[in-house]
Image (cartoon, rainbow, N blue to C red):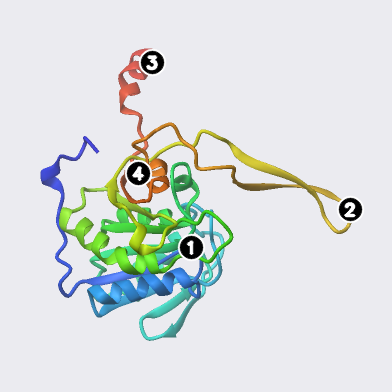
Amino acid sequence: MSEHPAETCCPIDLTGCRILVTNDDGVYAPGIKVLEAIAREITDDVWVVAPETEQSATSHSLTVRRPLRLRRLEERRFSIDGTPTDCVVVALGKVTTGRKPDLVLSGINHGGNLAEDVTYSGTVAAAMEAALLGLPAIALSLTRRGDHDFRWATPERHAESVIRRIAASGFAPDMLVNVNFPDLPPERVQGVRVCAQGRRDVETKVIDGVDPGGRPYVWIGDYMSDDTLDTHSDLATVNEGYISVTPLHFDLTQRRQLERLEAAFR
């Protein structure tokens, strides 16, 4: 974030703002209903444009080889048979044309988007597309560490305050914010920590299996754990019971390597 000094950050006045809500789990997912309700605590001007079906792990994919179907489900609620990125593009180009959203909220994802997850996540990608288009954006996800139901009461209790504090802090150009809630009841959440994107200490599992026809297959499974040695990362923060808040920037240039490579090609 050093490329953008603090004075370039623009706080957002949420009074009377317009919020666009999207996700990658689909327009009928429980998480987007929770997020829409949270958004309505902030403003009455809330629009939902989300994928028709689940689009998890689609990353920042954009549909360009076929037409998309935009369906109006009810007033200010639409579905698109495409990706989360498609939803943001179409929302701005065809749905909220009279006035652009002041804030884009993506989620609440069914499961954390931590560490390497942000490179695969459709939830984060929707927020990234909004940032590319010049809009402040926040991706929100709820972790789960077992087979129990998702603890939606936790973001219901804490998300509005987190969103308001992020908005008051402001957004630098080309920036989005990634928020993850721990798998704890709302009263046991330890607080909020601003932290960096982490990296897991283990690799993704590839699972062998046999289908009903006797044919072998491999299935790319979940991460084996969220273990990390980086105590200042989003992984460690959520593991310790805190809500993680991570500013992300989509400029992938490794700037420390620029001069070395420039010298190599002189």
Q: Name the residue beneath numbered marker 2.
A: 214
Residue 227: horizontal and vertical position, in percent? Answer: 49, 38
- Find the distance from the CA under tag 3 to the CA under tag 1: 42 Å
Q: Amino acid at mark 3?
A: Phe
**Pointer 3 or 2: first along the chain:** 2
Helix, strand or loop at label 2? It is loop
**Pointer 3 or 1: first along the chain:** 1
In this rendering, position of residue 61 left or right of residue 206: left
- Find the distance from the CA under tag 1 to the CA under tag 2: 33 Å
Q: Amino acid at mark 1?
A: Asp
Q: Name the residue beneath numbered marker 3.
A: 265
- Residue 24's label in the rendered image is 1
Query: Badges 3 and 1: C-beta atoms under 8 Å apart?
Result: no
Q: Amino acid at mark 2?
A: Gly
- Find the distance from the CA under tag 3 to the CA under tag 2: 54 Å
Q: Quadrant of the C terminus?
A: top left
Residue 165: horizontal and vertical position, in percent? Answer: 20, 58
Query: Badges 3 and 2: C-beta atoms under 8 Å apart?
Result: no
**Pointer 3 or 4: first along the chain:** 4
Of circles 1 and 4, the one toward us is 1
Of circles 3 and 1, the one toward us is 1
In this rendering, position of residue 220 left or right of residue 123: right
Q: Quadrant of the N terminus?
A: top left
Residue lying at 38% horizontally and 74% vertically, measured from the top left: 48
Q: Name the residue beneath numbered marker 4.
A: 250
Q: Residues within 10 Å of mark 1 (few under 14, many from 20)?
A: many
